[in-house]
Image: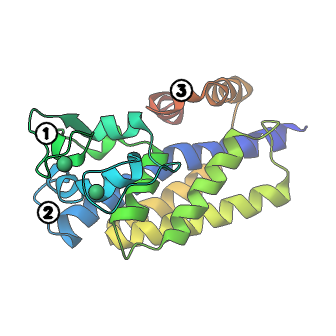
């Protein structure tokens, strides 16, 4: 494993784990306010509460969701968006159901990590190209579960180009300013020198996946240069 391979891994992680969630959050904000015409993110999530509930729950008070199956949304993700209220079910059912939840007021996309952003975009933001979302999620998972913290040149070029294209296309939906900012950031990161201490910090961060959810640590790393 060469120093170059390690540096390539580091730069790709910074792109995937820091820049991607930022862009995905902008896509959701833009979609909910401008495209869906919602008053706020809370308003948008509230309007789509039933669909989101179906991603999380195995049963619902409506007649459309009855069978047990594995669900794509975790309870912790649902709980980060919604809070239980004191209402009873409007269908008169005694099971856990969307009638018994409200979106957390004042919520922002900052509470959403990459996985939750992807889930929200794929399910309640129709029209956003899900291939870009799939690219981001796949590469993020490959980086996190990589056997060694290094990337050879060929793999790196593949990841970098695919991620870069996905990010630029998504940024373009939001605004020309975000698009330009994204292009500049990708160029800047591509030429970034990664020092060994920084790489070690990044590796520790990735081993401990729990610390990745808030991404503050990745952000702190990025700010160092
Ligand atoms: Zn339902
Ligand atoms: Zn209900």
Q: Nearer the viewer, residue 194 or 18?
A: 18
Per the image, label 2 sits on a secondary structure element best described as: loop
Left or right of 122, for residue 37: left
Q: Is residue 193 visible?
A: no
- The x and y percentages for residue 197 are 69, 22
- Look at 38% across and 56% down and name the residue there: 120
> According to the image, label 3 marks what residue?
210
Q: Residues within 10 Å of mark 1 (few under 14, many from 20)?
A: few
Label at residue 198: none
Q: Nearer the viewer, residue 214 or 134?
A: 134
Left or right of 22, for residue 161: right
Could you tell me if the residues under marks 1 and 2 are in contact, i.e. CB atoms within 8 Å?
A: no
Q: Residues within 10 Å of mark 2 (few under 14, many from 20)?
A: some
- The x and y percentages for residue 59 are 36, 48
Distance in Å between CA atoms under marks 1 and 2: 14 Å
- Look at 65% across and 66% down and name the residue there: 162
Distance in Å between CA atoms under marks 3 and 2: 32 Å
Per the image, label 3 sits on a secondary structure element best described as: helix
Residue 89 in which image quadrant: top left
Is ligand 1 closer than 8 angstroms to the Cβ of mark 2? no
> According to the image, label 1 marks what residue?
105
> According to the image, label 2 marks what residue?
38
- The x and y percentages for residue 32 are 23, 62
Which sits earlier in the primary sequence, circle 3 or circle 2?
2
Does 178 sit above or below residue 96?
below
Which sits earlier in the primary sequence, circle 1 or circle 2?
2
């Amino acid at each position: 494993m060469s120093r170059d391979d390690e540096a390539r891994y580091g730069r790709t992680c910074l792109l995937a784990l820091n820049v991607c969630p930022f862009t995905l959050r902008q896509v959701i904000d833009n979609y909910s306010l401008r495209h869906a015409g919602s008053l706020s993110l809370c308003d948008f999530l509230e309007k789509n509460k039933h669909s989101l509930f179906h991603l999380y729950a195995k049963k619902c008070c409506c007649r459309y969701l009855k069978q047990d199956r594995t669900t794509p949304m975790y309870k912790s993700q649902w709980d980060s968006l919604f809070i239980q209220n004191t209402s009873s079910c409007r269908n008169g059912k005694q099971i856990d159901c969307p009638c018994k939840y409200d979106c957390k007021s004042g919520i922002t996309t900052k509470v959403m990590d990459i996985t939750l952003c992807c889930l929200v975009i794929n399910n309640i933001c129709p029209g956003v190209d899900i291939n870009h979302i799939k690219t981001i999620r796949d590469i993020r998972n490959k980086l996190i579960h990589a056997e060694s913290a290094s990337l050879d040149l060929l793999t790196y070029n593949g990841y970098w180009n695919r991620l870069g294209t996905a990010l630029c296309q998504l940024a373009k939906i939001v605004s020309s300013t975000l698009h330009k900012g994204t292009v500049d950031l990708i160029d800047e990161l591509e030429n970034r020198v990664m020092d060994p201490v920084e790489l070690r910090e990044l590796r520790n961060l990735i081993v401990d996946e729990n610390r990745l959810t808030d991404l503050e640590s990745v952000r702190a790393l990025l700010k160092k240069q």
